[in-house]
Image (cartoon, helix red, strand yellow):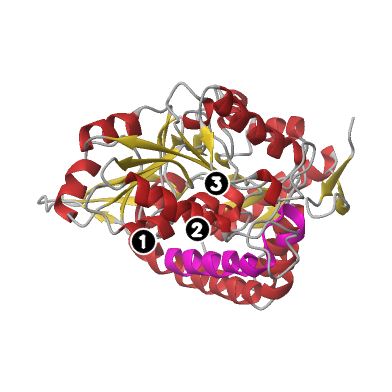
């Protein structure tokens, strides 16, 4: 049985971090401390909670340079863009702090003579946040911060690929004045994580990860009747209408497909283009991708870093080869990328055409720097193909006819709809998915509903 986490950096295959898994005694002590601390924390005035959380974010941002470097080495994001996650995390955190009063506000009922009635939001207790490696701070903060603001205690279990992220958040909250036990972390194996999920001291689970991981979490929590928030995979589509601004659509959609080496649950993985502009869009897209520089993440000139591990890159290689074997055409020559070899996390970008939904690359989550581009004849065909997926996270339409775009967006089975942009989380909007993209909601004022429970007061004041 493994007793330690060894984080292998995709940059050079070295061990970047090594940590010991928490023992059973340490895990029990952490759970006990969280339960005890939460009883006091929930009594703390919201204004004070907001102040402590704001101070924690200040402390986190003060170390942004070293944190960005750690992101680069732990999961392979190019150093030139790693700092963007720190900035994005701050935006989400500040927004959720600003929305806390509204999200946690008491709901007043209509007047009824002789009675006072209201509904207030109560914290659920101890929240376990299980966070992934691909956006290690952005995904974690979605649940960690609103859970704390709502009066819960939080235990963070981060990915074994990014264990330092849990530690840096803990340090920031300690520096911000968070009372002992309110925010803690545990380095856990999969088996130990399941045991914690099944422990009656945990009152809510917030999980971000794969569909298989989400199913495992649901199974571990089965019969406990607690809240389980699942932010899972995506196979997010974009549709380029005939009236779209082609240059803008290329720049937005290609960035949405290839940023973070395509390792984003809401990245663009399939594109449908109206046949009247198909060739123009394709040629501009190929030119855009050919400007990417594949290389070590710690090289400031690199714009496309390695995938998180070699096995992930080989999975994508197999998807691409399967598609080519079925008739797809690859437009980016692998010979231009000497780092790309089977067994290496360094993977050349690829644009595939002559694709269809019989191919894995158009239906199965890729999570790599590859996008399929398929020609369509009309809006109806595009919408049918966009909905033809087991996932339903986001979708984007590029058009100059905003009213028509909105009409089409109403027909899509997804959680977030974009017009003329993609691959972005606005913290004032609910982040949610349908089908195999998950259940529950984070961010926005609605996100607070999933980290609290309603408590109704019914007071008869005249006897």
Judge from the rendering whether residue 404 lies leftward or rightward of residue 136; answer left or right: left
Q: Earlier in the sequence, mark 3 or mark 2?
A: 3
Judge from the rendering whether residue 30 lies leftward or rightward of residue 96; answer left or right: right
Label 1 sits on residue: 247
Question: Label 1, label 3: how many angstroms apart (C-alpha)?
Answer: 50 Å
Residue 76 inside the magenta-drawn segment? yes
Q: Is residue 173 visible?
A: yes
Front tag of 3 and 2: 2
Question: Label 3, label 2: how many angstroms apart (C-alpha)?
Answer: 49 Å
Q: Residue at x 34, y 38 (%)?
A: 414
Can you say whether 353 is above or below 67 in the image? above
Label 3 sits on residue: 125
> Residue 365 appears at what percent x and percent y?
53, 34
> Residue 90 appears at what percent x and percent y?
53, 69
Judge from the rendering whether residue 87 lies leftward or rightward of residue 444; answer left or right: right
Q: Which residues are magenta?
A: 72-96
Label 2 sits on residue: 288
């Amino acid at each position: 049985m493994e007793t330690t986490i060894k984080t292998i950096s995709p940059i050079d295959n070295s061990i970047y971090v090594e940590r010991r898994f928490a023992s059973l005694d340490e895990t029990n002590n952490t759970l006990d401390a969280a339960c005890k601390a939460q009883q006091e924390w929930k009594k703390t005035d919201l204004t004070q909670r907001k102040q402590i959380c704001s101070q924690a974010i200040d402390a986190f941002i003060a170390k942004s340079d070293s944190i960005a470097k750690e992101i680069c080495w732990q999961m392979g994001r190019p150093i030139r863009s790693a700092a963007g996650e720190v900035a994005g995390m701050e935006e989400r955190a500040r927004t959720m702090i600003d929305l806390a009063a509204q999200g946690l506000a008491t709901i007043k009922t209509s007047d009824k003579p002789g009675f006072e009635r209201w509904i207030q939001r109560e914290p659920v207790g101890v929240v376990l946040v299980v966070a992934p490696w691909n956006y290690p701070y952005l995904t974690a903060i979605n649940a960690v911060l609103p859970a704390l603001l709502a009066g819960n205690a939080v235990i963070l279990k981060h990915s074994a690929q990014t264990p330092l992220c849990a530690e840096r958040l803990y340090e920031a909250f300690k520096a911000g004045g968070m009372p002992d036990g309110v925010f803690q972390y545990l380095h856990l194996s999969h088996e130990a994580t399941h045991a914690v999920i099944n422990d009656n001291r945990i009152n809510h689970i917030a999980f971000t990860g794969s569909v298989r991981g989400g199913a495992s979490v649901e199974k571990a929590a089965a019969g406990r009747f607690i809240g389980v928030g699942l932010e899972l995979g995506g196979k997010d589509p974009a549709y380029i209408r005939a009236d779209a601004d082609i240059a803008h659509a290329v720049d937005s959609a290609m960035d949405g497909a290839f940023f973070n080496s395509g390792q984003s649950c809401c990245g663009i993985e399939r594109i449908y283009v109206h046949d009247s502009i198909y060739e123009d869009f394709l040629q501009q897209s190929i030119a855009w991708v050919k400007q990417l520089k594949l290389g070590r993440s710690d090289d400031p000139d690199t714009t496309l870093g390695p995938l998180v591990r070699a096995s992930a890159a080989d999975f994508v290689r197999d998807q691409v080869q399967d598609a080519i074997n079925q008739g797809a055409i690859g437009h980016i020559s692998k010979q231009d990328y000497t780092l790309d070899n089977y067994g290496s996390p360094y993977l050349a970008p690829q644009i595939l055409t002559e694709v269809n939904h019989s191919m894995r690359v158009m239906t199965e989550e890729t999570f790599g720097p590859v996008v399929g581009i398929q020609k369509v004849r009309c809006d109806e065909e595009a919408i049918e193909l966009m909905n033809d997926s087991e996932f339903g996270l986001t979708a984007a339409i590029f058009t100059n006819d905003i009213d028509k775009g909105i009409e089409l967006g109403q027909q899509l089975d997804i959680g977030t709809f974009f017009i003329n942009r993609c691959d972005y989380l606005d913290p004032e909007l609910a982040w949610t998915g349908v089908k195999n993209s998950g259940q529950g909601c984070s961010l926005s004022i609605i996100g607070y509903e999933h980290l609290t429970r309603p408590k109704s007061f019914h007071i008869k004041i005249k006897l």
